[in-house]
Amino acid sequence: MSTPTPVSARGRTRWLRNGYLAVAAGLVALAVVARLLRPDSDLATLALVVAILCVLPLVGWAARWTWRKLTYRVGLRLFISYLLIGLTPFTLFVGLALVLGYVLVGQYAGTRVGNEMQRLSAAMAARADSAVRELAQGRTEYARELLQAGGTDQERGIREEWVLADASGEWRSAGAAELPLPRWVDERGWQGEVVHGAAAFLAAVERRGNRFAAVLMPLDIANARAFTPGGWYDVRFVAEVKGATAATTGGRNARIAVGGEPGGPSTFRIDGQSVLQTQVEEGWLTARPAEGSRWQRARLLWIWSGKTPRALGSGEELKGFLLLTLIKLSPRGAIDDLFGPTDKIGSEAKAMLLVVAAVFGSIYLVAVGFAAVMILRVTRSTARLTRGARAVAQGDLDARIPVKRRDQLGDLAVSFNAMTESVGTMLAHVAEKERMAREMELAREIQESLLPPSELSSGPLSVWAHFRPAAEVGGDYFDLFPLAPGRLVVSIGDVAGHGLPTGLLMAMVKSAAAALIEEGYRGGELLSKLNHLLLGQSLKQRMVSFALAEVDAERREVKIASAGHQPGVLLAADGGVEEVLLSSLPLGHRWPDPAPERSLPFAPGSRLLLYSDGLVEAHDDAGSPFGYERLQGVLRQNRDAGGPQVLAALLGELDRHVGGHPLADDLTEVLEEHRPAPH
C-alpha cells in the first residue's frame, strides 16, 4: 500500500495563489455582467464593491513584485537612494519656504489692516473730541457740522454714522437713528469694535460730563470696498451674530473653513454654515484679475481678528461674538509694498545672483557626475560578486571572482575566492558537527524530559523552578515529590562538571533519589543512602552537592537536609530573611558525620529559595561574583511579588550583572511558597 506524497509549502502557496486568482477573476466577471444587465441594481453595486476589494490585494502584490524586480540591481537602488538624499532637502526647503512665505505675507497684510483700522479710529476719535468740545461751548450747530463733514477718508467712499448728545437733546446721522447712546464710556473716551443687533461698527466715543460724541464706521461690504481702493489687498468684514453658533463655538474657538459645492463658487464657512452674502458676496473669494501673469494674478486669503467687540448699548464684552476681517491679498503686491518693485533691483545684484546660481549649479552637476561614476563602479563589482556566488551555489567550487580594484568590494572578492578553496573540507566538518549536534540535542531533550514541571501546586503549597544549563547537557538537577495535599519534598543537586557524563550521573542520582523517597527515606537518612550508592560506583567523577526540603503545610514547618549544597534562603512570613547554613561534605565523599538536618517554621506567607552555585558564582567582566548579598537584596525588593515574578527578577538582575556573557556553570532556582489563606 503506497503512502500519499506530502504537498510542499511552495506547492500549497501556488495552489492558494491560483485559487485566489480564480476567485478574483470570477468576481470581476460577475461584476461586469451585473453592470451590463442591471447597471442600477443593488446587486450590481454590491458585486462591483466586492470585486474591487478582492482585486486590491492583487494590485498591492503586483506593485511589490514590480518594485522588487526594478530594484534588484544595486546600482538602481543606489541611484534611487541618491535621488532621495539629494532631492528631498530641496523639496522640503521649497515647501517650508512656501509655508513661511504665506505666513509672512499674511502677517504683513494683517499688520497693514490693523494699522489702517487704528488710523481710521484715531481720525474718528479726533473729530469726536472736536465735536464734544464745541458742544461744551454751546456751539451745537458747529459740532454737528464737524461730524457731518467727515474727514479725508470720506473722499475714499468710507461711510460714517455719528451720534451727538448733551442734556438738551440728541442729534444723529440718518443711519444712526436706531443706535443707542454709549453712556457707559467714561471721560477717557473709547475706541474699538462695537456690535448692535446684527451690525458691527468701528467706533470712537468721546465724553465730557453729560456730553457725548460718537463716530461709527459700519463694517459692511460698502466700507470694505472703500477700505483699500486699488490696493494690493482687499478686505471683507465678517460678524457672526447667530446666537446658536456663537454660543456653541465659544466665539474665537469656532471652526473656520473655505469650502463650496463642487464646480460652484467658494464660500466662507463658520462651523459649517456659510456667512451671509451681505458680508461676503458670492464669488469674492475666487475673483482674480483677468490680466497679468499667473504670479501677478495670484491671490491668497488671510484672516485678521481684532480685540473682543463690545455691545454698543451696554459696553459688555461679547466674548461669544466672532468679528473677523478677511484679507484677500496679492503676494506680488505685498512683496513690492515691503521691498519695493522688483525692477528697482540693481543690475549688479541680478548679475551677482546669476553668478552664485551658476557656481552652485556647477558644483551640484560635478557632485552628480562623481556620484554616477561611484555608482557605476559599485554596480560592476557587485555584478562580479553575484556571478561568482551563483556559480558556487550551482556547485562550481572552482569558480573565482576577478579582482579589479583593491577596495572593500575587492577585499570581499579576495575573501570569497579564499572561502571557495576550503568549502570541500568545511562541508565534511559541517556534516560531522551536525551529527554531534543532533546527538547532543537528543541528550538535552532526554535530560529535560527527566525534569519535573516548572510549576506545581499541592494544597496551599506552590513551587516554581527555572533551569538553565551552561552547556548542551547540564549537571544540575531538581525534582518535586508530592507526598500528600499540603506536603511535598523538593530536591536539588549539582553534579561537578559539564557535558554528557555529568548528565548521565545526574540521571542516575535522580532515579536513585526517587526510588529512596518512594521507599520512605527522608532527610539525612536518604542522603546517606545516596552517598553509599555513589561510593559503590567506579566513577572518576562522582562529587554531587545535594539538598532536600520537606515542607508540611499543616505543621507549618520545613525540614532541610544538605550534603555540601548552597545554603537556602528562607523568607519568613514576618518579613525576616534567613540564610539556612548546613555545613557538610558533598555526596561522593566518605563522611565522618551524618548529613545535617534542620527544622524551621514555615507559616503561611513564607518562602524558601533553593539554588545552585551557578547563581551566586556568576561573575561580571571584572570578575566580581553575583554574591549572596545581591541575592538577598533582590528577594527583599520583590517580597510582595508573585513567585514567577521573583524568579524573573533574579534572572533579570543576573543577566544585568554578567552583561550578556554566557554562564560558566549551570543555573537552577526552586522557590517554594506557603500561600496564605484567602480572606
Image (cartoon, rainbow, N blue to C red):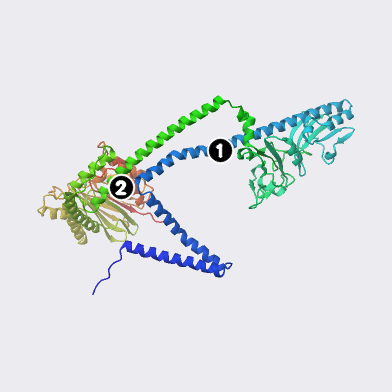
Q: Nearer the viewer, residue 216 or 234?
A: 234
Q: Is residue 383 visible?
A: yes
Mark 2 is on which residue type? Answer: Leu
Q: Please state if 62 lies on the left or on the right of 504 as rendered.
A: right
Q: Residue visible at 30% across and 46% down?
A: 383
Instruction: Note whether 397 is above or below 142 in the view shown.
Output: below
Mark 1 is on which residue type? Answer: Leu
Which numbered tag is attached to residue 570? 2
Q: Residue visible at 29% across and 53% down?
A: 465
Q: Residue furthest bottom?
A: 1
Instruction: Note whether 466 is above or below 98 in the view shown.
Output: below
Q: How many marks?
A: 2
Q: Nearer the viewer, residue 573 or 23?
A: 23
Q: Please state if 662 lies on the left or on the right of 236 as rendered.
A: left
- Mark 2 neighbour class, 10 Å CA radius: few under 14, some 14 to 19, many 20 or more: many
Badge 1 or badge 2: first in the primary sequence: 1
- Mark 1 neighbour class, 10 Å CA radius: few under 14, some 14 to 19, many 20 or more: few
Q: CA distance from mark 1 to mark 2?
A: 71 Å
Q: Residue 543: horizontal and vertical position, in percent? A: 15, 49
Q: Please state if 16 lies on the left or on the right of 295 as rendered.
A: left
Q: Nearer the viewer, residue 346 or 119?
A: 346
Q: Residue 667: horizontal and vertical position, in percent? A: 25, 48
Q: Is residue 619 visible?
A: no
Q: Secondary structure at mark 1?
A: helix
Quadrant (top left/top right/bottom left/bottom right) for the C terminus: bottom left
Q: Please state if 310 lies on the left or on the right of 457 as rendered.
A: right
Quadrant (top left/top right/bottom left/bottom right) for the N terminus: bottom left
Q: Which residue is mark 1?
A: 98
Q: Residue 14: horizontal and vertical position, in percent? A: 35, 63
Q: Quadrant of residue 340?
A: top right
Instruction: Note whether 354 is above or below 9 in the view shown.
Output: above
